[in-house]
Image (tube, rainbow, N blue to C red):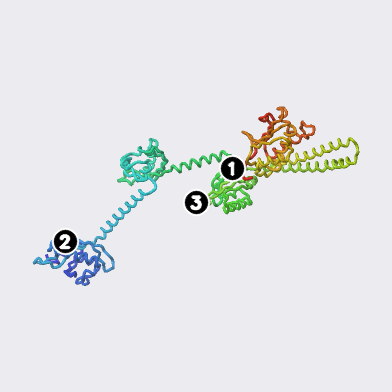
Amino acid sequence: MNGRGQVVAAMRNGAVVFDSEGRYTDVNESFLNLTGYDRERVIGATLGLLHDRVDIGRITRATDRLQRSGGGGHEVVTAVVETAADERVPVEIDLSPLTGDDGSIRGTIGVVRDISDRDVREHRLNSYEHELERYERLVEVMGDGVYALDADGRYTMVNEYLLDMVGEDRKTVLGETPSLFHDDVDIDAFESAIESLLNGTSSIETVETTIETDGDETIAVAVNLTLLPRDDGEFNGTVGVVRDITEQKRRERELERYQRLIEATGDAVYALNTEGEFTFSNGAHQAIVDRDEAELLGEHAAISLPDEAVEDGRGLISELLASDRRCSTYEMNVLRPDGELIRTENHVALLTDEAGEFRGTVGVLRDITERKQRERELRRQNERLEQFASVVSHDLRNPLNVAQGYLTEIDDPAAGAVDQSLDRMETIIEEVLELARQGQTIDDPEPVPIEETVRAAWGNVETGALTLVVEVTGCVLADRNRLVTLFENLFRNSVEHAAAEEVVVGTDAGVDFSVADDGTGIPDGDREAVFEMGRTTSQTGTGFGLAIVAEIAAAHGWNVAVTEGRDGGARFEFSGVEQTVDEC
């Protein structure tokens, strides 16, 4: 068959004939259609018209091998045809020697096939394979457990993370059912979730359950389920993503515990975000502001505050953010819907995330309306006591001073007795004044070192041979001057009335501090009356000493009681005393 006949035989594909120098000697119409050139441009042109150097080298080497083979066989090469329109078309060229009637090789014939579609298919297939490999790697390295079950509910795939979670190897798990890790209750939950997926109720179902690991550990997990693609509409199995939520559950339990504690305290608790909007409000808080939760959540705090309280709150938060402090306390008014103002004390703390960024505030409100009323009443009482003291000081001292002045001009044996009576009157006046002053409420107590105060009071009293033992340390919140006076009066009581040899200042269970002596003691029937004004067993006493002690204790908010000491003497016990760890 001559060259032209061979070309015609290949009409369905492109066909070319080129000589030993690589020049085209014949082409068919299919090839011309493929390249976009006319016959005159192609015939006589070299391979370089349609191919680059790499392809020319590949074709040349293939024809050389055909010539060396003596004219038998064929070679297939892939190349790219550069068309007249500057497009690049991938082709497959099936090369075979072109022989003459005498059997000599006169050139090469090539059947040219456009493999663009095949390349696309292969490219897509390769892309699918690469995509599948990428997803397989993603499944293996993702921080969640992943598995697949077939239609019979048996594991067909598990990733390494899930195997590490349950402590099993892949060989043990594949082919098994979820009952390997779950009890019947969990299996029922999974089946119910799959039924919802099959019914089209949802595309993803979540089941919270637990997994029993190979090490007998129980792990709380959330399993997100979805269906595998179906074949011919039949159920094909499920895919599950297993997330360890053990820490999340622990935090939820801790949060619930704190929420219950908050509710149990009875205090009003709220939380605001960075914009000042309510994110939490417990029942006590809703009661103070007289609004329910639905009215508060998402609303700005200004809904329950007057303008000045809003500004004060903003200023306080700015101060906290600019300092090392994270909490503070201030008084403010709450504005109810009916316009009523409720005076409250607000304990505010900053909320921050793990990075220390500001995330809002939390506050604890306390209604201090009654406390403020008591404070006003106490101020009025203190003012009346001041007025009383002023009257005593002025109206009684002046006549007393006049009498003492005249007494110096009288030369009479009875003048001495009168002088003693006047001195006693002056002492009574001084102690009445002291009683009035000591009964005033203490508004701002400070940390006071109790041992140092005891020894200072002891040094102010003529104690004679009486000895002191101090068994208390630390600091209490008190008015130091009044605390000194309290101890002075107790020490004088031991000196003047108890015939004691030793005084012990100590403490005991249920008692913050006590003062006890080893003297004669106080009979049971007289113990309640010892704090009454004017009560005394001494001919020279005024009966105000222990009354002053009681007034000082009451001014601090303390309780005082009289019992028998360990050595039979009198023991004065004080409770309700606030200790402090602050420096004093």
Sequence-earlier tag: 3 or 2:
2
Q: Quadrant of residue 280?
A: top right
* Residue type, label 3: Ala
Question: Residue 216 vs residue 273: left or right?
Answer: left
Q: Quadrant of residue 13?
A: bottom left
Q: Which residue is mark 1?
A: 268
- Relative image position of residue 89 (x, y in whole percent): 26, 64
Q: Residue furthest front?
A: 465
* Label 1 neighbour load within 10 Å: few <14, some 14-19, many 20+: many
Residue 323 visible (yes or no) = yes
Q: Residue furthest left?
A: 102
Of the residues tagged 3 and 1, which is closer to the observer? Answer: 3
- Relative image position of residue 254 (x, y in whole percent): 50, 41
Regarding mark 3 in the picture, which secondary structure is present there?
Answer: loop
Q: Which residue is mark 3?
A: 355
* Residue type, label 1: Ala
Q: CA distance from mark 3 to mark 2?
A: 72 Å
- Nearest the eye: 120 or 169: 169
- Nearest the eye: 88 or 6: 88
Q: CA distance from mark 3 to mark 1?
A: 28 Å
Sequence-earlier tag: 1 or 2:
2
- Disc 1 to disc 2: CB gap under 8 Å: no
Question: Residue 501 vs residue 93: left or right?
Answer: right
Q: Which residue is mark 2?
A: 74
Of the residues tagged 3 and 2, which is closer to the observer? Answer: 3
Quadrant containing the C terminus in the rendered view: top right
Question: Residue 245 vs residue 422: left or right?
Answer: left
Q: CA distance from mark 1 to mark 2?
A: 93 Å
Q: Quadrant of residue 498?
A: top right
